[in-house]
Image (cartoon, rainbow, N blue to C red):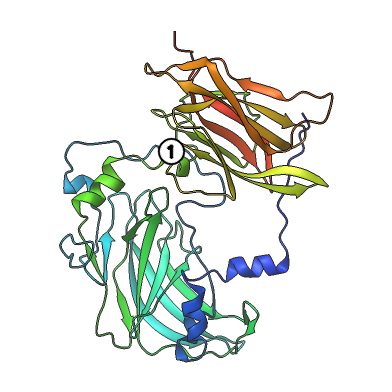
Amino acid sequence: MSGAVSRPTFSPQAALREELTVAPTVKTLMCLLLGAVIALAAFAFSAETKAQSPKAPGPDKGPAAKAKVDPKELYGDQGGEKVAVANARAPNTVMRARLEDTFLKLSNTRVAQKPNKFNVLLVDYEVVSRGKLNGGFLVLHTDDGGRAEIALKSIIDRDNGTIELGGVKWFGNVRIARNTTFPDNIEFYVVRGDDRYEPPLKCMVSNTVVMGKMKVTTRPRDWTPEEITRYYTKPPLAYKNPNAHAGIGEDVPPLPAAGGQFRYVDPDGRLLGLDYAVGDWDNRKVVARLTPVYSVDQPKAQTARSVARKGYAVAGAEVNMDKYVCGIRLLFQRVKPDGTLDAKDAYAGDWIGVPPPPKSEATKLVNDGRRVLGIHYQQGAIVDRFSLVVEEEAKK
């Protein structure tokens, strides 16, 4: 197989969209363009990444299951902020920080003018307690109830400094005046999320600081028993938790060391199928995106899905692969009551992508009775290499 790896390319428009992804709803911010709250939509920000970045994350098995939870093991520093009682429905509250969270103190919010005549919002910060988890989003909460989240990048691994929110020339295809007017009343605080869970976890990891006046401000709160179970005592969802179990399972075939590798494993489950997207690359059809499926009720992550019938599971695969992965066909077998696979009751799924050309054979992976735990692939602009992850020895 060639060592060539696909590389993503970005147009200027794509780069601009990435720079301007500042809030959860574009509709809300577009409405703000008509008034003073235009500032919430018109920032190019120095920003931090989410827990799940586009790059392949490093190993992280997540918290181990525990019968009882000691608050001292769960909760981290809240900077002296008053903490509300556990109530998921309480308005203007966010789950309090975890023990592993880095906690920030925000202060001295102000508007300044740069030499280029741009108005900028400035917020000072300092690290109160340093944990292993960094990153987050600066939340801007206005007195009319609007909220925008701005991904922070510039403050990771720094002990103190100033967050600068500055005006840009364009928001999408709408031209923005350089010297924008900011809202008079804004509350600021930082949240940190983890989208390996469903719904994603979000914790408040700073104090709140107000510019102007706010009738209602946001407070941290204790976690409910349901949230403790979902986010602390249970591991993250396997299909959202790549590279977490490096020592579990065998890759068939092994992938060479390279960047952009994603290895999904469910140590206690079995692979049921794949969500996928197919695209065009180098003048041919290729597999562009993959997500493992471990449950039939798992939300679809890509444009299409190949999944086992009820009572069956993935036993192997056939792959059409040269420089890139052009096609994958999953091989399914019935799961017997004892958990082993029945090779006599098997079928092949439809091709994901395209089959090999005439007189060529696909590469067969596994299909030897071993439980398939997940997938391992290398991703650039498209899927370059693919393997199945299986338990190391077949059940007798």
Residue positioned 26% across, 77% down in the render = 217
For disc 1, the marked residue is 295
Query: On the picture, is 389 further left or further right than 214?
Result: right
Residue positioned 42% across, 48% down in the render = 196
Whether residue 29 is visible here, answered yes or no, is yes
- Amino acid tagged 1: Ser
Residue 253 sits in quarter: top right
Category of crowding for the residue at label 1, using alpha-carbon neighbours closer than 10 angstroms: few (below 14), some (14–19), many (at least 20): some
Residue 199: x and y in percent read 37, 54
Taking depth in this image into account, of 341 and 1 the one nearest to the observer is 341
Would you place residue 285 above or below residue 116 in this image?
Answer: above
Taking depth in this image into account, of 124 and 167 the one nearest to the observer is 167
Would you place residue 87 above or below residue 2 in this image?
Answer: below
Name the image quarter holding the N terminus: top right
Taking depth in this image into account, of 22 and 190 the one nearest to the observer is 22
Residue 303: x and y in percent read 59, 50
- Residue with the most extreme top position: 396
Residue positioned 73% across, 41% down in the render = 5
Name the image quarter holding the C terminus: top left
Q: Label 1: state its secondary structure.
A: loop
